[in-house]
Image (cartoon, rainbow, N blue to C red):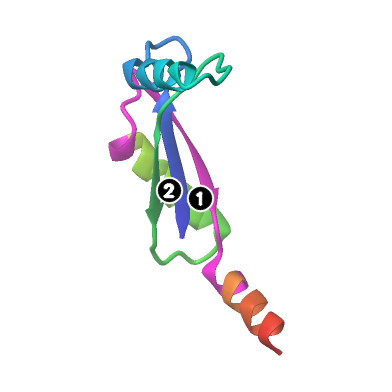
Amino acid sequence: MATIRVRPKAEVRDPQGEAVAGALRSLGMDVADVRMGKEIVVRFAASDESAARAAANKMGDELLANPVIEEFAVQVVQVVQVVQVVQEAAE
């Protein structure tokens, strides 16, 4: 499983983030800046963490992020390890 976080590049204007920042300020919150993005969680099979990271990066490069205006970051979670931790906690 991988989480791919996509957001506008720093040099690209973010109208959605600007709107949220304005709304937060109107509520009396001291907000300097807001950047909006999206988080995509993908479950898939991979032989190891390196292969999973490579696959998730390919997904980001080829489909999930527009390289002209967006950047992305990948976080790989090994589901097997998560299940083991839950099982250990239950014992």
Check if residue 68 falls in the magenta segment: yes
Give the alpha-carbon distance from disc 1 to disc 2, as whole Å: 5 Å
Q: Quadrant of residue 66?
A: top left
Q: Residue shown at 28%/38% (left/top)?
A: 63
- Name the residue nearer the viewer: 39 or 43: 39
The answer to which image quadrant residue 49 occupies is bottom right
| Residue positioned 49% across, 56% down in the render | 51
- Would residue 29 appear left or right of 9 to someone viewing this image? right
- List the single residue furthest toward the bottom: 91
- Neighbourhood count class around disc 1 (C-alpha, 10 Å): few under 14, some 14–19, many 20 upward: some
Q: What segment is highlighted magenta in the picture?
A: 62-81
Amino acid type of the residue tagged 1 in the rendering: Arg
Q: Which mark is residue 53?
A: 1
Pointer 2 residue: 56
Residue 85 percent coordinates (x, y): 66, 75
Q: Is residue 23 above or below residue 83?
A: above
Percent x, y for residue 42?
38, 56
Q: Residues within 10 Å of mark 2 (few under 14, many from 20)?
A: many
**Residue 83 image-quadrant placement:** bottom right
Towards the viewer: 91 or 20:
20
**Residue situated in front as seen by the camera: 38 or 69:** 38
Name the residue rendered at 50%, 43% in the picture.
Answer: 74
> Element at badge 2?
helix
